[in-house]
Amino acid sequence: WIRTDIIHSLSHYSPLIRIEIQVKQQKVTSVHPTFSKSLLKKCDSINHNIHKLFTTQERRMSRPAMRSSLFLKEAAFHDAAVEATSHVGDDLKDNPNALNDTEAMITIARRFLNSSAPSLLDVLDNHDDVKSSSDRLVKVGRNVSSTMRHARRTSSTANLLAAAGVEQQQHQQQGNSLPPFSKEKIDASLGLLAEESSDLASLLTGEAPQVPKVRFGKTEVEMPVITLGCMRFQQSWDSSKVEEMTKVEDDCQNNLVNIIRHAHHCGINHIETAKAYGSSQLQIGFALKTLFDSGEIKREDLIIQTKGGISSSMTIKDYKEQIVQSIDLLQLDYIDLFAVHGLNTQMEYDLLFDNPMNNGENLIVAVQELKQEGKIRHIGFSTHGPADLTRRAIETGCFDYVNLHYHFCGSYTASGDGECAGNLSNIRLAHEKDMGLFIISAFDKGGRLYAPSNKLRDLCLPDFEPMSYGCVWLWQHAMHDEKKAPCHTLSIGAARPSDLDQAVLASHLLLSDQEDLAERRQRVSNRLAKAMEDVLGKDWVDSWHVGVPNAHTSTHQTHHTGIVWAYNLIQAWGMLDFAKDRYGPMENHLKKWSVDKTKAENIKAMGPGFGWMPGTAFDASLDYTIDFEKCPDKNKEQLLKAIQFVHDLVSKKKNEITGNKEDGKEQKELEEERTIPLDWEVAYDMRPWSAFPER
């Protein structure tokens, strides 16, 4: 009646469990009666995998013996967090800068884990990678501190509203403030952290399952649902500064090797880099040689992808030589996947398929020839381009897979494009073509989820942390998309080994009850949708993008779709810092833009960065009404207000607030209007230290 492997799995979770089996009576008992009832209730289907039985949302809060004795007690995790943060002074408890106090965060983490997930504390204290153990403790400390800090501040706001006679519901409907964290929500959110901490202990000791794999379209590659992105762990983004390993710091290379080692340990065997990623290829090549020579990892166990860009001066011979040089830097005989890097504008499309330069040599031929020669096994392309350009590239039939931006919050540079307001139509088209679907930058361009706003995090909890929700939303895309189009893998740009942990733990949820996981995901999706409609109105949410031009089609190369998208994210989910990251490059482009130049001259002046991060920022001296001529009349006024709002809020030129001076407001008043609501502040930042290339 009961499989012994399940019993062993149960027993593994905690020494608190003692299971006795009496085969004749077909009886199961445990030291905890509530646990016995839970197990017996499922006795008719006990032959199911343990992860299906006990990782459902329904049982997560009622499986006390599996993790910690705290699961037996009401509000136990809340109380544990109160105790863990009790040593922090009141001046630090509500100070966001306190989250940067590494020692304080480690102390809080230790005190919290000591009662909620002691197994992780034991593993970290005995782990070979001391630096990564410290990083993981910092992250736990920031999670606990952020939760308790936000709970105190929302409760304080609620009390002030009550004293002023303002209804909390009315205040929320105006898009102002979140409701206070209830004790139950705090406890459930911290219980989620405790659960993930226990799972992390199992992961680090090799007792957790591997990251699931899926078929990567017509490549037939068995692709892990997580890809190791290699843009943030190298010494420098400038390859000319690091042309040999003597220029690489030992700490940087050791960190890089440990990231690859941890990824492989977790089942992430897809490594993705590019020529444009500075010294990444060079350092990966030496790391792989070390790991191959030691026998720790075999070449055939890895899926390695690199990417290479093109230029108007290139010939087929030039492009082939560039790609072979990348393969040589990686110290490989072949690569599994090669992507044309940055098919972002019409120019790149023409160079590949209708080349007006170099006697009409279409550069796609270079990649096809290398495939025939066995240097490349599968051909793809990556893009930051508009949705229509991506569609045309897919329709050529020349590619086996595509790397693009597509996330629950939008499609990065393609947000607002086309009928689907982004890359959804291209996800579906790629599925029709049986192409592999690779999602770029799930945690960064997908919403800066490693440092979410208070509001975004609050809307995700207690079902998920934002990073986990972003992953699950993509992995279950075929379940919630009416065309059943899947997203196969998503890249995590790891700067340190622990950056992979959240995604890996989230991937294990795919081994559990998918219907239950879908219910959790849908609860978050519903809360996010409601929050957006409450602030912006359903009519605006459904139609804001209609007729709005992007950087490639607007009169002054202004990226209206991207700016209005940022407006929506700020207003609905408080994603202010994400909007700042997106708007900064537009301001830089505006410095090089001139009304006296033609469109082609301006794009050339802005340089290749325009294709990767397109568009210019708002300029009060320009008339944008012509850009919105094709938009619904009901939206035109709001569109102009939206681009003005974003500029006034996130522009780096803080002393040049435009558009309000005529109202007679003084600078001090204007600065006060910039006061950031609590909901828009960053909840935490899961980057314990600056990545090497960012230093």
Image: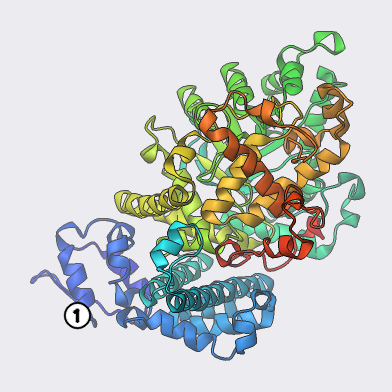
Q: Residue at x 13, y 70 (%)?
A: 23
Residue visible at 64% across and 58% down? 261
Q: Residue farthest to the front? A: 664
**217 lies above or below 116:** above
In the rendered image, the quadrant that contains the C terminus is bottom right
Q: Is residue 360 left or right of residue 526?
A: right
Q: Which of the two residues, 93 or 311, is positioned nearer the viewer here?
A: 93
Q: Quadrant of residue 345?
A: top right
Q: Is residue 141 above or below residue 171?
A: below
The residue identified by callout 1 is 33
| Residue 174, image x, y percentages | 47, 57
Callout 1 crowding tier (Cα within 10 Å): few <14, some 14–19, many ≥20: few
What's the amino acid at mark 1? Pro
Task: State left or right for residue 302 relative to residue 307.
Answer: left
Query: What percent of the width, then of the height, locates residue 615?
Result: 74, 35
Q: Answer whether residue 292 is visible to the viewer in this image.
A: no
Q: Measured along the vertical axis of the image, is residue 677 above or below residue 398?
A: below
